Amino acid sequence: MTIFVILALALGAAADEYAESKGFCNDKNPSCASWARNGECTGENSEMLSTLCPLSCGTCELECSDKHEACAAWTKEGHCQSNPVYMIKECPTSCGICTPTCKDLHADCPGWTTAGACGENPGFMLKNCPVACGVCKDDCKDTHTDCPGWAMGGQCHENPGFVLKSCPSSCEICGAAHCADSNVTQCEIWGAEQCVTNPGAMLRDCPKTCGICASVCYDKEDACPDWASKGECEENPASMLSLCPQSCGVCRELEKFKGEIKDEV
């Protein structure tokens, strides 16, 4: 039995409901809360801050999603760049403001990926095995609306056990990198119990071990919108759909699909 027959059977075996899956809208600079409080969101830099500080400036709420079915198509046509004032509010996922959370929906996803299914059958695999296929990767994402304000008020240091766990983006846990332990071996030695007894150090040095990381969907290259507008998503899907999932509409599809495929096929 070929892998593609197995994939088709797996899809047919999925009996769970379809429901909307929300993503996270986070500020991209720790100073956003301060700028918003000082009125910068409506000042001369308002257009820039609407993208840089989408949560503090009200571009989108913490839990967010595209508001129109046509968002993915509009994004491929370049409207996030040509009409940003409208698009980033109405299509935050497709325009890269909102990052949907995701997970693999089948226990066999790693094996299918090793067999080359991500490239040979991207339409099914990237939607049902987004983590195994590299569409979604670990990142630091705030999970509470008040995170920018808490960070500005010093709570990342005063109350690390709760705030670092809830606000890894605002507290700059990841820094310039995506969510990963700074020393994998040492973090394993310390163990997850240290995340509770010594949160100030552990949550910063070992975010992966401490469960801070969220698997989210986002473009991996700044040039993705341009490539998508030139038709690369359709001409070169094997690499583009995993490298540029937001610009190619994959994140939008993950946002709409939430279910769990059975282990048995």
Image (cartoon, rainbow, N blue to C red):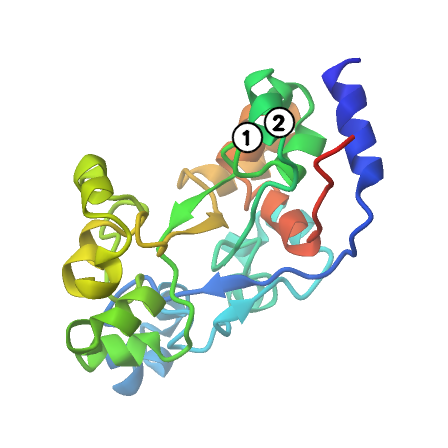
**Closer to us: 6 or 126:** 6
Q: Circle 2 is placed at which residue position?
A: 237
Q: Amino acid at mark 2?
A: Pro
Write down the quadrant of residue 239 in the picture: top right
In the rendered view, tell whether residue 153 sits above or below residue 170. Answer: below
Q: Secondary structure at mark 1?
A: helix
Q: Secondary structure at mark 2?
A: helix
Does residue 97 appear anywhere in the picture? yes
In the rendered view, tell whether residue 153 sits above or below residue 16. Answer: below
Whole-percent x, y for residue 35 in the image: 26, 78
Q: Give residue 93's mark.
A: none
Write down the quadrant of residue 57 in the picture: bottom left
Q: Circle 1 is placed at which residue position?
A: 240
Q: Local crowd at mark 2 within 10 Å, few (<14), some, or many (≥20)?
A: many
Q: Local crowd at mark 1 within 10 Å, few (<14), some, or many (≥20)?
A: many
Instruction: Decide if residue 24 is on the left or right side of residue 18.
Output: left
User: Looking at the image, which residue is at 24% across and 80% down?
Assistant: 34
Whole-percent x, y for residue 200 in the image: 16, 64
Instruction: State how many labels appear.
Output: 2
User: Looking at the image, which residue is at 29% across and 44% down?
Assistant: 180
Image quarter where the N terminus lies is top right
